Image (cartoon, grey):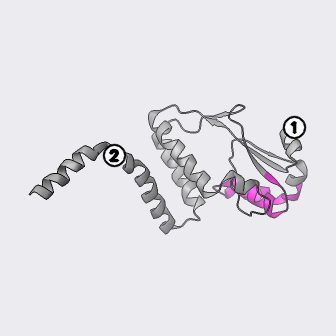
Amino acid sequence: IRYAEKVGVDALCVLPRFRYNSFFVGVVLPVMIWLSIIRVSPLETNNPRSNRVFGFGNFILLKRQLVAELNELKNIKGFILDDCAIFEKAKMAGGSVHIAEGADLLESHMYSSLRELVSGFTKNAFAGIGFSWAMAFGLIIGVASVFAVPLIFVLNPFLEFLAISFIVI
C-alpha cells in the first residue's frame, strides 16, 4: 500500500517469484512468461501514454475509489484474462496503473504438472491473442522454434556428418 501511495497509482500489480515443482513446469513456464512479457511489457503498462496493459492476477491492489468508478468489475467475471481486463478498464477510465517487481515479497506456485501448465497457458494465450487462429499458429511455431533451436545445436555434429556424407555421395 505504501508503494502504491508513493508511486501514486490507482491500480498496482506485483509480480512474484515463481516456484517450479516439476521439471517440465521449470522448463516451460519461464518461456511462457517471457512470451507474455514480450506481448505487453511492464514498461508499456506503466506508461500513461500507452493504452497497452497486462495484469497478473496473483496480486492486484486497487484503490477503493477506482473500484467504485469501475462498477463494471462484476461484468469481468466471464473474461478469461480478467486481470488484464481490470487493468485495461482502469486505464481507459483515466486511472494510473503500475506493474512492480516483487520477487523478494511474493512467491507463486502456478502449476504442479505439465498438463496443468498446458491447459492454463493455452487458454490464456488464445485469449491473449484475441482468439486468432493465425496468431495461434504463429505462436506455436515460435514456441516450437525456441525449443528446437537448442536441439539443433545439440545435434549439430550429427547433422554435419549427414551433410558431409550427402556431399561425398
- The front one of 124 and 154 is 154
Q: Residue at x 87, y 37 (%)?
A: 2
Q: Residue at x 78, y 63 (%)?
A: 49
Q: Of the numbered discs in the image, which one, if any, rests on residue 103?
A: none
User: Hey, which residue is sitting farthest left in the picture?
Assistant: 169
- The front one of 168 and 33 is 168
Inspect the image, locate mark 2, and give the three-letter code of the amino acid beneath it: Phe
Inspect the image, locate mark 1, and give the three-letter code of the amino acid beneath it: Arg
User: Is 159 covered by the magenta stretch?
Assistant: no
Looking at the image, is mark 1 or mark 2 nearer the viewer?
A: 2
Relative placement, left or right, of 120 versus 148 is right
Q: Quadrant of residue 154?
A: top left
Q: Taking the image as drawn, is residue 77 in sight?
A: no
Q: Quadrant of residue 130?
A: bottom right
Percent from the top left, x then y, of residue 121? 54, 50
The vertical placement of 150 against 19, above or below, is below
**C-alpha gap between disc 1 and disc 2:** 48 Å
N-terminal label among 1 and 2: 1
Q: Number of numbered discs present?
A: 2
Q: Which residues are magenta?
A: 68-97
Percent from the top left, x then y, of residue 110? 59, 39
| Mark 2, secondary structure of its residue | helix
Q: Residues within 10 Å of mark 2 (few under 14, many from 20)?
A: few
- Give the quarter of the figure containing the N terminus: top right
Q: Main secondary structure of the magenta part?
A: helix
Which residue position holds label 2? 153
Which residue position holds label 1? 2
- Give the quarter of the figure containing the C terminus: bottom left
User: Hey, which residue is sitting farthest right in the picture?
Assistant: 65
